[in-house]
Image (spheres, helix red, strand yellow):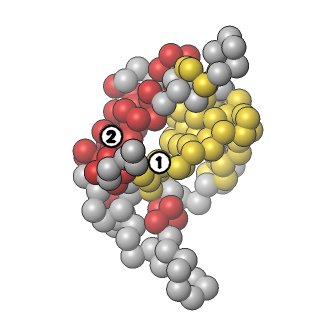
Amino acid sequence: MKALIQRVTKASVAVGDDISGEIGPGLVILLGVSKEDAEADAAYLVEKISNLRIFADEDNRFNRSALDINAELMVVSQFTLYGDTRKGRRPDFNQAAGPEQAERLYEHAVQLFQDAGLTVATGRFREHMLVSLENDGPVTLMLDSADRQRPRRG
């Protein structure tokens, strides 16, 4: 499971003329699910994102997490995070999970964020969405649940 996270001052997502969700200060999380992912991948990313210290303290240092500041989250399904562009000119999405598996794990991740006590807005799964955001910093990070199985350099 991959997550592209962006620290924002505000964000919204629209489906057609309908605003599906909007948040104030917090994180936009674009969440991609692969064929290999399971609930443990969602749990890893939710724990990591919720506790990642990427919000400034009074000394303007990255010392506060989403949980520390009660950040709002916008979680948007994003299968294109698994686009492979190594060959040809059209991305290959063969590693992305099928719709049923992806939706189940996406919803599971959203529920885990809510269970952690965070306010969560979402897009709409399998819909064309327009995501608007004001990136704060900018701060943008890519997380991959496969990293939990890789050794850290040392």
Crowding at mark 2 (Cα within 10 Å: few <14, some 14-19, many 20+): some
Note whether 76 is above or below 63 in the view shown: below
Visible in this render: residue 100? no
Residue at (39%, 45%) from the top-left corner? 154
Residue nearest the viewer, comparing 114 with 49: 49
Residue at (59%, 60%) from the top-left corner? 128
Q: Position of residue 67 (x, y in %)?
A: 47, 20
Residue at (66%, 26%) from the top-left corner? 24
Q: Position of residue 63 (x, y in %)?
A: 56, 20
Q: Position of residue 51 (x, y in %)?
A: 44, 27
Residue nearest the viewer, comparing 111 with 6: 6
Tell me the tag on residue 44. 2
Amino acid type shown at disc 1: Leu
Residue at (39%, 27%) from the top-left corner? 114
Tell me the tag on residue 143. 1
Amino acid type shown at disc 2: Tyr
